[in-house]
Image (spheres, helix red, strand yellow):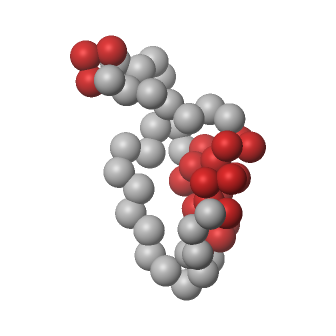
Amino acid sequence: MRPKKRLSQVFLIAPAVARLIAEAVPLKGKRVLEVGAGRGILTRELAERAA
């Protein structure tokens, strides 16, 4: 998957950064809607913490 410049897309590819983002938000027991999940790296981190 390649980012589209016309849509100003940027994909998160660093697992360590995704982990830091997910750790910064209290998610336990909450529902999360991630819009534009890209490659799913952040999605995985959020799902693990929200479960």
Q: Nearer the viewer, residue 30 or 39?
A: 30
Q: In which quarter of the image is residue 15?
A: top right
The residue shown at (50%, 31%) is: 11
Question: Taking the image as drawn, is residue 1 in sight?
Answer: yes
Outermost residue toward the left?
A: 6
Outermost residue toward the top?
A: 5
The relative height of residue 49 versus residue 19 in the rendered view (above or below) is below
Q: How many labels does the image show?
A: 0
Image position, residue 16 (x, y; %): 74, 43
Image position, residue 22 (x, y; %): 62, 59
Q: In which quarter of the image is residue 44?
A: bottom right
Image position, residue 41 (x, y; %): 60, 44
Image position, residue 51 (x, y; %): 62, 77
Question: Taking the image as drawn, is residue 44 in sight?
Answer: no
Q: Nearer the viewer, residue 33 or 25?
A: 25
Outermost residue toward the right?
A: 16
The residue shown at (56%, 75%) is: 27
The residue shown at (68%, 53%) is: 20
The residue shown at (27%, 24%) is: 7
Outermost residue toward the front?
A: 24
- Image side of residue 7 versus residue 13, left or right: left
- Image side of residue 17 versus residue 31, left or right: right
The relative height of residue 10 versus residue 44 in the rendered view (above or below) is above
The relative height of residue 1 versus residue 16 in the rendered view (above or below) is above
The relative height of residue 13 versus residue 51 in the rendered view (above or below) is above
